[in-house]
Image: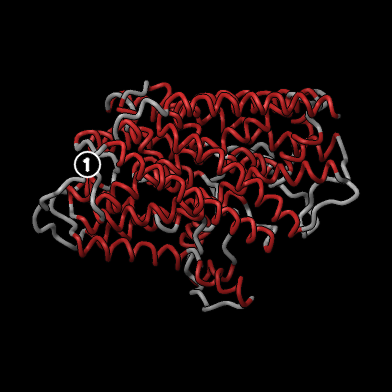
């Protein structure tokens, strides 16, 4: 055991040494803010592609998606890829050219050019809050490994709920500090080139995980399929919702509305893949500074578009690989190995959120285990690094340099962004600790739901305003945009039953009763709902005149 652990530590140590070396190397190559935030628009398209993938494939995906495969034993989650691809085409054809045309650093500068400063400030504020919540929640995920490792090394004294909270808290603080160090030192260049390394490590980890599982299931893939004979096992397409409407509901409101309500209350259907994920990806890849900032580091809009579209194609095999890992784990622990120490939920079933890290720590051999752990760290640090850089860039460009005296010296401006990077690292630590606290209180919560749910409530309002800005010339203004964004957020919160859910966490009672005909929408539909309401309200207001912009 000690020799195997030694190999793991060697691999992880080499990984960290390379990461820190990359950050130090690029620290001397940032001459101005454009270099620090956009890499001087000199990054080759294939490195941008790798960086986009590294941001998308977070530790939440690395652990959460195998968990979905383990729970569902099918590929219905992959239906979301259809909308992902279509959205990338739209982003590449419409969003990216507009950002390059106006030479923006923060994409919310474009909204000031089109509408005015209030729209820019509100959109950037929504991004700062939402991205902090989403990235902070992601930060908690990889620390699950620490709990599994501790329980393996101390089987006679496994960690209790609150002990797990303190262990995960210490781990996420350490990971954040290390990531903040190379991000603040090297800027976006350091982030992107570490992403290239990280995506290579990730692919290796995923490939070895699938290979190892197939090698330890009798008969390999054919042997696994022989155990996957349930009605929904290995299913790819799901047309109907998994929450069918009750007979009484159908009689009162009709079969058609019953079917629609069922689809809106289901996570993974063909309709969610076509429409729900289309709006999700338009928002995350077209209106999120975290993602778009990577795209704007490419040499021109054509190379940026190539990287964006190819990243969508590359997402397909990655998604199938992580789902396959979860499906194979369900066979491995359900039919090959019966492990009484398997992580369990409070309800008595296997804990799908911890099943993959448990397998990595307890079953994989030394060295290979170290590679997978490095892969987890890679996904975490890759998405965390760009989150910090984009949060700091957006805050500095959209607020600090407009509210306070802007330093004339480029190095002084860069110092402001570096300090903002450290500040947001502290914010993300607090959010990560809060997520761990909530999870300790509610062990049954889904990882994917926590991460995707946080931006589902607000990004529809962002996307709606960008759609009005890009596709119209005479609609939308400062007052109307603010009203529209607030309306979109409130509408989604109500349709998602968020006020009731929050109230029940505090009092165990409902705050209000819902109409029987009203669907409680799942996360793939939230951004679409928010976008539609925001666009509808914003279109009611006419653009008076183009504002005169004092660019920061």
| Residue 280 position in % (x across, y down) | 42, 46
Kindly give the residue lying farthest to the right in the view shown. 156
- Quadrant location of the N terminus? top right
Task: From the viewer's perspective, tell me whether residue 196 is left or right of residue 474.
Answer: right
Vertical arrangement, residue 356 with respect to residue 167, above or below: above
| Residue 548 position in % (x across, y down) | 10, 51
Vertical arrangement, residue 33 with respect to residue 71, above or below: above
In this view of the protein, which residue sits in the foreground, 73 or 68? 68
Q: Count residues near mark 1 (Cα–Cα under 10 Å), then give few for <14, some for 14-19, many for 20+.
A: few
Residue 130 quadrant: bottom left
| Residue 499 position in % (x across, y down) | 50, 71
Q: Which residue is mark 1?
A: 408
Rendered residue at 22%/35% (across/down): 103
> What colour scheme has been applied to the protein in the rendered image?
secondary structure
Vertical arrangement, residue 129 with respect to residue 369, above or below: below
Q: Can residue 76 be seen?
A: no
Rendered residue at 62%/77% (across/down): 507
Residue 148 quadrant: top right
Rendered residue at 73%/24% (across/down): 368
Rendered residue at 48%/38% (across/down): 385
Residue 545 quadrant: bottom left
In this view of the protein, which residue sits in the foreground, 330 or 135? 135
Task: From the viewer's perspective, tell me whether residue 171 is left or right of residue 133.
Answer: right
| Residue 315 position in % (x across, y down) | 50, 31
């Amino acid at each position: 055991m000690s020799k195997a652990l030694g190999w793991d530590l060697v691999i992880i140590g080499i990984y960290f040494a390379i990461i820190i070396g990359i950050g130090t190397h690029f620290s001397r190559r940032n001459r101005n803010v454009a270099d620090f935030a956009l890499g001087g628009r000199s990054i080759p398209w294939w490195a941008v592609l790798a960086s986009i993938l590294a941001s998308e494939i977070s530790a939440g995906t690395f652990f959460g998606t195998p968990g979905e495969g383990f729970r569902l034993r099918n590929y219905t989650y992959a239906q979301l890829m259809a909308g992902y691809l279509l959205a990338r085409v739209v982003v590449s054809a419409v969003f990216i050219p507009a950002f390059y045309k106006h030479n923006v650093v923060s994409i919310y500068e474009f909204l000031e050019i089109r509408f005015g400063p209030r729209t820019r400030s509100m959109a950037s504020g929504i991004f700062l809050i939402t991205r902090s919540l989403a990235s902070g929640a992601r930060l908690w995920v990889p620390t699950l490994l620490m709990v599994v490792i501790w329980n393996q090394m101390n089987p006679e004294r496994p960690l209790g709920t609150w002990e797990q909270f303190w262990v995960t808290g210490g781990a996420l603080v350490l990971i954040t500090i290390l990531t903040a160090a190379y991000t603040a030192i090297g800027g976006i260049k350091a982030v992107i080139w570490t992403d290239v390394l990280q995506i290579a490590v990730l692919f290796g980890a995923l490939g070895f995980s699938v290979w190892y599982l197939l090698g330890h299931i009798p008969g390999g893939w054919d042997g696994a399929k022989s155990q996957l004979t349930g009605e929904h096992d290995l299913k790819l397409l799901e047309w109907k919702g998994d929450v069918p409407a009750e007979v009484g509901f159908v009689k009162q409101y009709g079969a058609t509305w019953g079917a629609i309500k069922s689809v809106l209350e289901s996570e993974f259907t063909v309709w969610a893949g076509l429409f729900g994920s289309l709006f999700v990806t338009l928002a995350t890849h077209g209106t999120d500074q975290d993602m778009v900032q990577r795209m704007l580091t490419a040499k021109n809009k054509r190379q940026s578009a190539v990287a964006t579209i190819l990243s969508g194609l590359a997402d397909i095999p990655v998604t199938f690989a992580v789902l396959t890992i979860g499906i194979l784990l369900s066979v491995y622990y359900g039919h090959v190995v019966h492990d009484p120490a398997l992580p369990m939920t409070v309800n008595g079933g296997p804990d799908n959120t911890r099943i993959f890290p448990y397998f990595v720590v307890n079953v994989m051999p030394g060295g290979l285990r170290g590679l997978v752990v490095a892969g987890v760290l890679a996904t975490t640090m890759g998405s965390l690094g760009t989150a910090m850089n984009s949060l700091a860039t957006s805050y500095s460009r959209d607020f600090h340099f407009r509210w306070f005296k802007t330093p004339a010296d480029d190095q002084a401006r860069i110092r402001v962004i570096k300090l903002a990077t450290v500040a947001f690292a502290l914010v993300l630590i607090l959010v990560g600790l809060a997520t761990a606290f909530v999870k300790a209180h509610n062990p049954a919560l889904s990882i994917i739901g926590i991460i995707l749910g946080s931006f589902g409530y607000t990004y529809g309002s962002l996307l709606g305003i960008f759609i009005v800005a890009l596709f119209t010339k005479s609609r939308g203004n400062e007052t109307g945009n603010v009203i529209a964004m607030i309306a979109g957020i409130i509408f989604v919160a109500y349709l998602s039953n968020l006020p009731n859910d929050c109230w029940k966490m505090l009092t165990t009672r409902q705050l209000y009763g819902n109409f029987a005909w009203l669907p409680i929408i799942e996360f793939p539909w939230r951004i679409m709902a928010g976008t539609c309401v925001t666009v509808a309200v914003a279109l009611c207001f006419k653009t008076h005149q183009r504002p005169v912009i004092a660019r920061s």
